[in-house]
Amino acid sequence: MQVKSDIRNYIVEYFLYGQDNGLGEDTSFLEKGLIDSTGILELVSFIEEKYGISVEDEELIPDNFDSINKLSAFIAKKMSGGDSSL
């Protein structure tokens, strides 16, 4: 899936400084300390621009943003017009 590849490439480039470091699709960004609160905002800006979606404040929860798989599913729901908030 292209979305997962886009997310992985962005994370590796901007947060892991080009080193993949075994980043799995279910690796927790928060538990591993890969992304902090400022990084989440940068990630939000990236996905809003890349996919033309709008992320609401109440959607900024770990269930939507804590791994490549979770973020990919969130983007897919937003692009299909589904409600992604829990």
Image: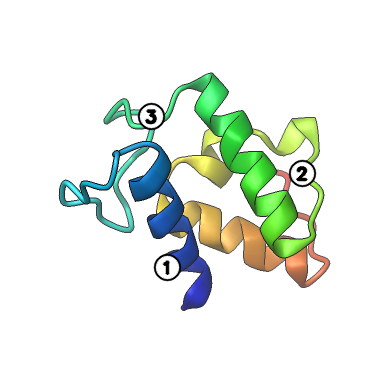
Residue drawn at (37%, 47%), measured in percent from left and top?
13
Residue 67: x, y in percent?
Answer: 41, 47
Does dot 3 land on a helix, a strand or a loop?
loop
From the image, tell me which residue sits under label 3.
Answer: 30
> On the picture, is 79 further left or further right than 42?
right
Residues at marks 2 and 1, CA–CA distance in whole angstroms: 20 Å
Q: Residues within 10 Å of mark 2 (few under 14, many from 20)?
A: some
17 and 60: which one is in front? Answer: 17
Q: Which mark is residue 5?
A: 1
Residue 1: x, y in percent?
Answer: 46, 78
Q: Which mark is residue 55?
A: 2
Residues at marks 2 and 3, CA–CA distance in whole angstroms: 19 Å
Circle 2 or circle 1, nearest the eye:
1
> On the picture, is 53 further left or further right than 38?
right
Q: Residues within 10 Å of mark 3 (few under 14, many from 20)?
A: some
Give amino acid for label 2: Val
Give amino acid for label 1: Ser
Circle 1 or circle 3, nearest the eye:
1
Does dot 1 land on a helix, a strand or a loop?
helix
Residues at marks 1 and 3, CA–CA distance in whole angstroms: 19 Å
Give amino acid for label 3: Leu
Residue drawn at (48%, 64%), measured in percent from left and top?
6
In primary-sequence order, the first of circles 2 and 3 is 3
